[in-house]
Amino acid sequence: MAGLFLKVSVTLAVVIAIAFQLLLKDLVWMGLGIGKHIQPLSDFPYKCRRIDDPRFQACEDMWLSESTRQLFMACSTTDGRKHWIPNGLSLNVTGRSLSDAIVAVDIDKPKGDSFEFRALKTPGFTGTAGDGLLNVLGVTGVDDPNGDVELLLNNNRPSLDPATGAILPDQTHVGANSTLELFRVSGRSSEMKHLRTFADAHVTTPNSMAPAGAGPGIRRFYMSNSGGPYKTGLKALFGPLFGSGDITYCDGSTDELSCKVVSAGHKLPNGMLRNSKDGLIYAASSVTGIISVFRPLPDGGLAEVDRIDIGYGLDNLSEDANGDIWASIYPRGIEILMAFGDPWNAKCKAAVVRVRREADGGYSWEKVLEDGDAEVLPGSTVAVHDSKTGRLFFGSVYAPYIGVCEPIPA
Ligand SMILES: *[C@@H]1O[C@H](CO)[C@@H](O)[C@H](O)[C@H]1NC(C)=O
Ligand SMILES: *[C@@H]1O[C@H](CO)[C@@H](O)[C@H](O)[C@H]1NC(C)=O
Ligand SMILES: *[C@@H]1O[C@H](CO)[C@@H](O)[C@H](O)[C@H]1NC(C)=O
């Protein structure tokens, strides 16, 4: 018996060791930041500060409207995020934030240490079971020629009880019932007008979205399903590490929405971006540290044309007016997972890299800023670069503040 047991456990250990080498080594190394040169803020020519404001809590994502000079942030509450992030299997619906909003920041209108801003109201939007609420995670947008902005956001709605139509008190068996919501903001309005709800069987674990074309408006788009089809249970927990994530294409150019998976086998796909300069689609993985580059095909399919190996856990991607891509990275990925335990006091290293297309068609990237001692910046899930001022904005899925860095003139 003991001999058999030993044999089985030796075999098991070998299997685990091989699995570790093949599948998880990079993840563990990246998660612990092994082999990384971690630098303090003082190494970089920026002056950074926090902006503490109850409305600037848990802003997982940001999108900069270049033409209206507004930064749109998808914000929640630090306490609420702990309980409700369906993509991360936090499914305590009674603990979720009841005040999620898109916050529009006027980045050319400083006010003290902060900026003028508006938390956008959503008149007429019915929310979940008529509550009028949003549960936002990601936001993207397009500038329309007439000065309006269209915003596409993912709404991680709680699921309903089919019998009563009320919100199910226990969401752990069914998971969220996410949708993507399209809104229009006119100028500097304090409201956003709801245009359309995109619901489909392939909108399962939406994390990030990218418009599929140049606009105007967003009717066709790509999105990353971070866990693929799995919303709950072990497959949802471990699947993303082994490639259950996908990229889905949706076409809503008619009243009928149609969505299909166009690229499968992604490991925790996160930030998505359509680069307006080259029209290519960029998809970042939080697990492999690779940005995959795709050429969109006429039927919505994606042909992979390149892979950029950054070697850090990646979160969101954003593009600046020069066409450069800015990626927020986790110098030590494990910290952001641990931050959810005590989000008010968490210390989490943050960094951002800039990815640039070279004349020969290849890519180069460089770390532009790092807060290796977690002095000022939140453990950032998004970094946005304003090429006009050189300023960087940092949002975080959990932190009760955002970070702003001003370049120090040389
Ligand atoms: C869910 O959230 C509520 C409200 O914040 C809290 O009282 C409760 O303890 C939470 N449940 C779990 C399992 O964390
Ligand atoms: C990430 O950023 C892109 C581009 O700014 C945006 O399209 C997307 O919605 C964002 N989403 C998330 C959740 O990271
Ligand atoms: C999920 O959303 C769809 C579309 O809005 C709705 O028809 C359906 O009843 C919802 N299901 C649950 C379980 O909430």
Image: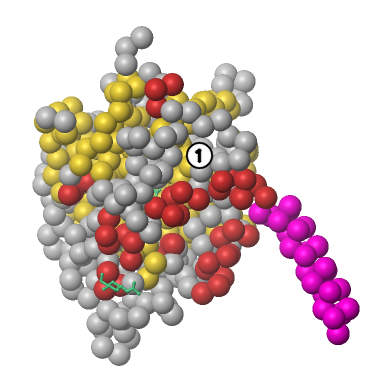
Percent x, y of residue 16: 74, 63
The part of the image, by quadrant, that contains residue 328 is: top left
Q: What residue lies at 43% left-to-right and 62% top-to-bottom?
A: 87
Q: Quadrant of ligand 1?
A: bottom left
- Farthest residue, direction bottom: 163
Q: Relative to residue 64, is residue 302 depicted above or below?
A: below
In the foreground, 219 or 231: 231
The reply to whether residue 225 is in sight is yes
Q: What residue lies at 34% left-to-right and 65% top-to-bottom?
A: 84
Percent x, y of residue 6: 84, 74
In the foreground, 57 or 373: 373
Q: Quadrant of the C terminus?
A: top left
Q: Which residues are magenta?
A: 1-24
Q: Which residue is disc 1 drawn over?
A: 331
Task: Indicate left or right for 279 with 63 as reference.
Answer: right
- Farthest residue, direction top: 410
Q: Relative to residue 237, is residue 71 depicted above or below?
A: above
The part of the image, by quadrant, that contains residue 5 is: bottom right
In the foreground, 133 or 7: 7
Task: Indicate left or right for 270 with 388 as reference.
Answer: right
Q: Is residue 288 magenta?
A: no
Q: What residue lies at 41% left-to-right and 73% top-to-bottom?
A: 175
Percent x, y of residue 70: 22, 36
Helix or strand or loop: what does disc 1 sit on? loop
Task: Indicate left or right for 366 with 40 as reference.
Answer: right
Q: What residue lies at 30% left-to-right and 90% top-to-bottom?
A: 163
The reply to whether residue 326 is in sight is no
Q: Main secondary structure of the magenta part?
A: helix
In the foreground, 35 or 173: 35
Q: Relative to residue 375, is residue 46 depicted above or below?
A: above
Q: Quadrant of the N terminus?
A: bottom right
Colour basis = secondary structure
